[in-house]
C-alpha cells in the first residue's frame, strides 16, 4: 500500500494498529467518530434524578455515549469513597449498557485538562453536562477549553440561568425511557 491514509481511515486504523502491535502512538489522534456527553459530579450517592439526566443527555444532545465522571473530591463533604461511588453509579446505569460509561474524574479544580483530553477523543464533539445549580461556575472553570458544547440539567428549587448562551441544550427530564424525578413538574 502506498500513499497516506485520510483522516477517516486513520480513525479506523490507528486503534487497531495500537492493539495488534501493542504500541501507543505518542500523539493522541481523534479516536472515534462518535459524539459524547460528559456528566461530571460527586454523585454521593448516584440517584434516580441523575439517571434521568443521563437518559436525557443520550436522547437530547446527539451523544452516542454519556461518560459519567465521578469526581475524586468535592467542596461538599463526601460520605463514600470514589471507588464506591463509581460502583454504585455503574449499578444504577447498567440498563443503558455501553451507552453510559462511568469513569473516575479528578477534582473540578483540575478538570480542564481532563475535559480537554476527553474532547480530543471525539471527532463529532463533546457535550459537557452540569446541573443548573453549578452550571455557571463550571462553565467559567472550563472556559479555557475551546469548542465545547453545553447542556444544563434542571435541579430542584434552582432555576435555569436567564442568560444562557445560544446553543446550550436545556435538558428535559422524563421525556425518554426514565420517568422524571418527583420534583419535575
Image (cartoon, rainbow, N blue to C red):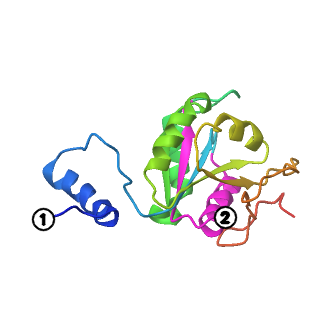
**Extent of the magenta region:** 46-72
| Res 56 label | 2
- Residue occupying the point 50% across, 49% down: 119
Residue corresponding to mark 1: 2
Q: Horizontal placement of 40 versus 24: left or right?
A: right
Q: Can residue 152 be seen in this view?
A: yes
- Which residue is farthest bottom? 176
Task: State the image coordinates of residue 135 (x, y, percent, origin top left).
Answer: 74, 44
- Residue occupying the point 69% across, 47% down: 130
Q: In which quarter of the image is residue 78?
A: top right
Mark 1 closeness class: few <14, some 14–19, many ≥20 residues within 10 Å: few
Q: Distance between the residues labelled 1 and 2?
A: 46 Å
Q: Quadrant of residue 51?
A: bottom right
For label 2, the SS is helix
Disc 1 versus disc 2: nearer the observer:
1
Residue 131: in magenta span: no
Residue 48: in magenta span: yes
Q: In which quarter of the image is the N terminus?
A: bottom left
Q: Nearer the viewer, residue 44 or 131?
A: 131
Task: State the image coordinates of residue 27 (x, y, percent, origin top left).
Answer: 31, 42
Task: State the image coordinates of residue 84 (x, y, percent, origin top left).
Answer: 51, 38
Task: State the image coordinates of residue 98 (x, y, percent, origin top left).
Answer: 44, 62
For label 1, the SS is loop
Q: Can residue 105 be seen in this view?
A: no
Mark 1 and mark 2 lie on one chain; the one further toward the N terminus is: 1
Q: Nearer the viewer, residue 22 or 9?
A: 9
Q: Which of 83 and 152 is in front in this view?
A: 152
Amino acid at each position: 500500500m502506498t500513499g497516506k491514509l485520510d483522516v477517516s481511515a486513520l480513525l479506523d486504523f490507528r486503534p487497531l494498529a495500537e492493539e495488534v502491535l501493542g504500541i501507543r502512538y505518542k500523539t493522541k489522534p481523534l479516536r472515534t467518530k462518535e459524539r459524547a456527553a460528559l456528566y461530571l459530579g460527586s454523585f454521593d450517592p448516584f440517584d434516580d434524578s441523575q439517571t434521568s439526566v443521563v437518559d436525557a443527555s443520550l436522547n437530547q444532545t446527539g451523544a452516542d455515549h454519556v461518560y459519567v465522571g465521578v469526581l475524586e473530591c468535592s467542596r461538599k463533604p463526601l460520605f463514600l469513597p470514589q471507588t464506591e461511588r463509581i460502583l454504585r453509579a455503574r449499578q444504577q446505569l447498567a440498563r443503558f449498557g455501553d451507552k453510559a460509561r462511568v469513569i473516575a474524574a479528578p477534582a473540578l479544580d483540575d478538570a480542564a485538562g481532563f475535559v480537554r483530553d476527553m474532547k480530543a477523543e471525539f471527532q463529532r464533539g463533546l457535550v459537557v453536562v452540569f446541573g443548573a445549580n453549578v452550571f455557571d461556575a463550571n462553565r467559567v472553570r472550563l472556559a479555557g477549553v475551546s469548542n465545547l458544547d453545553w447542556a444544563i440539567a434542571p435541579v430542584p428549587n434552582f432555576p435555569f440561568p436567564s442568560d444562557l448562551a445560544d446553543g446550550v441544550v436545556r435538558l428535559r427530564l422524563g421525556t425518554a425511557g426514565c420517568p422524571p424525578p418527583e420534583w419535575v413538574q
